[in-house]
Amino acid sequence: MDDGRITISAYDTAWIALIADVNNSDNPQFPSSLQWIIDNQLPDGSWGEAHFCPYDRLLNTLACIIALKSWTTHEDKIAEGIAIIKTLLDMCKLENVESMICGFEVIFPALLERARNLGIEIPSDTPFVKEICAARDLKLERCSNRSKISLVCASREKL
């Protein structure tokens, strides 16, 4: 039996690249992560696995764009990434919802907001994006309601 194989995750690498150096917050703590992002942009301008899933590719690409923009580096790669985002959004809209990765409806709107806060212009007024944001709101509302119910039940147990 082989020991197994794990591939590098563009999404996780982007989050690691965002960590500021503890001694100099103007630099990344893990510059090799940022360098990996710079070196591994795909020919179409996106980042991600060889196996193509538009939902996954969209999250990977947006996370990598955010990492590059946060360190104000490689505007050319950021522009290429932004250019493919619209295509990826269109692909996601046409993709079977069963292939949506777990938590996409929560992760994507959070990344979209973070991108906006960095001045990255990503289309957010499309029906698909609005639908995903509505799904996030519904999920968070349900979680909030469950928390309230759990709190009431826990309080009743104490009585």
Image (spheres, rainbow, N blue to C red):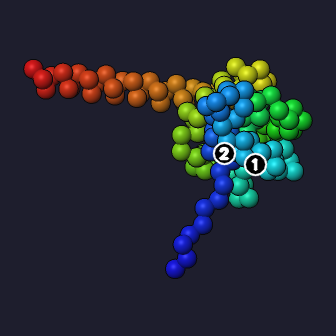
**Left or right position of 107 against 124:** left
Counting from the top left corner in percent of width and height, residue 63 is at 69, 37
Q: Residue at x 36, y 24 (%)?
A: 145
- Where is residue 20 drawn, in percent x and y? 65, 31
**Is residue 94 or residue 70 the one in the foreground?**
70
The answer to the question of whether label 1 and label 2 lie on touching residues, with beta carbons closer than 8 A, is yes
Return the x and y of residue 156 as percentages of the image width and height: 15, 22
SS of the residue at dot 2? Answer: helix
Which residue is the site of mark 2? 13
Residue 11 visible in the shown view: no
Q: For this rendering, which residue is in front, 109 or 68?
A: 68
Q: How many marks?
A: 2
Disc on the earlier residue, 1 or 2: 2
Amino acid type at image mark 2: Thr
Quadrant containing the C terminus is top left
Determine the residue located farthest toward the right in the rendered image: 76
Q: Which residue is mark 1?
A: 36
Res 122 quadrant in image: top right
Whether 151 is drawn above or below 41: the answer is: above
